[in-house]
Amino acid sequence: MKPRYGYGFFSIDLTGEFRQKILFFYWDPDEELYRSVSNPSGRKLELEAMKNNMQSFLDSERILINGGEVRAKVVYADIGFLSSVKRPYVEFLITFRGSFMRGVNRYENYYERERVEYDYRVVWVFPEGFKVLRAELGFPYNLVDDRIVVLDLKKGSEVPGYELIEFLAP
């Protein structure tokens, strides 16, 4: 099974909750994943293993909101197929919460540097009325309507192991 593409979507609300949806798309010519999830007990085991693996990855990160450390938690995982059992995808929903204040706020994430194995896109959407002031993501990004950050990474790129987004909350 080979990873083909990833997509991450962060939605931030006024309470300081970050909701992240991640989709990983694969090419699986031998139908390994399909065989492992084709019965209810196998599906349950595979989902639990994937959820635990993602949680372990998140536990190795250090996430700070305005200097306070927060913990990301996998709250949902699922496996599906796009038009063929050779084209599986894995979906995760992840949440974490920080405390926002009126004025300038900071999101920071420290994680392991690595080389990207597949193309992927990350989109951050801040609430209406918020304004992204700056971002250090290690790659060029597009800022839409002052509150939506769009980042595309290409296979073979090296992620820096640190990201920062400063944003203004009304």
Image: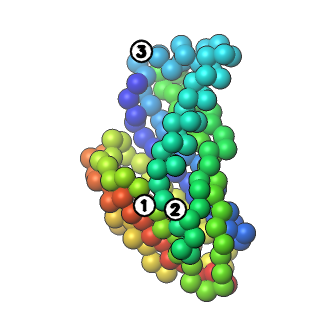
The earlier-in-sequence mark between 2 and 3 is 3
Which of 108/23 is in front?
A: 108
Percent position of residue 52, x then y: 56, 36
Where does label 3 land, which residue? 30
- Type of amino acid at the residue the image marks with label 3: Asp
Q: CA distance from mark 2 to mark 1?
A: 6 Å
Which of 71/96 is in front?
A: 71
- Residue at horizontal 62 percent and vertical 49 percent from the top: 73
Which mark identifies residue 163? none
Percent position of residue 143, x then y: 47, 71
Instruction: Determine if residue 148 is in view.
Output: no
The earlier-in-sequence mark between 2 and 1 is 2
- Type of amino acid at the residue the image marks with label 1: Tyr
Percent position of residue 39, x then y: 65, 13
- Residue at horizontal 47 percent and vertical 35 percent from the top: 25
Q: Disc 1 on helix, strand or loop?
A: strand
Q: Nearer the viewer, mark 1 or mark 3?
A: 1
Q: CA distance from mark 1 to mark 3?
A: 36 Å
- Type of amino acid at the residue the image marks with label 2: Ile
Q: Quadrant of the C terminus?
A: bottom right
Q: CA distance from mark 2 to mark 3?
A: 37 Å
Where does label 1 land, which residue? 110
- Residue at horizontal 59 percent and vertical 56 percent from the top: 71
The reply to whether dot 2 and dot 1 touch (C-beta < 8 Å) is yes
Bin the neighbour count of mark 1 within 10 Å (Cα to Cα): few under 14, some 14-19, many 20 and up: some
Where does label 2 land, which residue? 63
Q: Quadrant of residue 15?
A: bottom right
For the image, the number of numbered tags is: 3
Instruction: Determine if residue 42 is in view.
Output: yes
Q: Disc 2 on helix, strand or loop?
A: strand
The reply to whether dot 1 and dot 3 touch (C-beta < 8 Å) is no
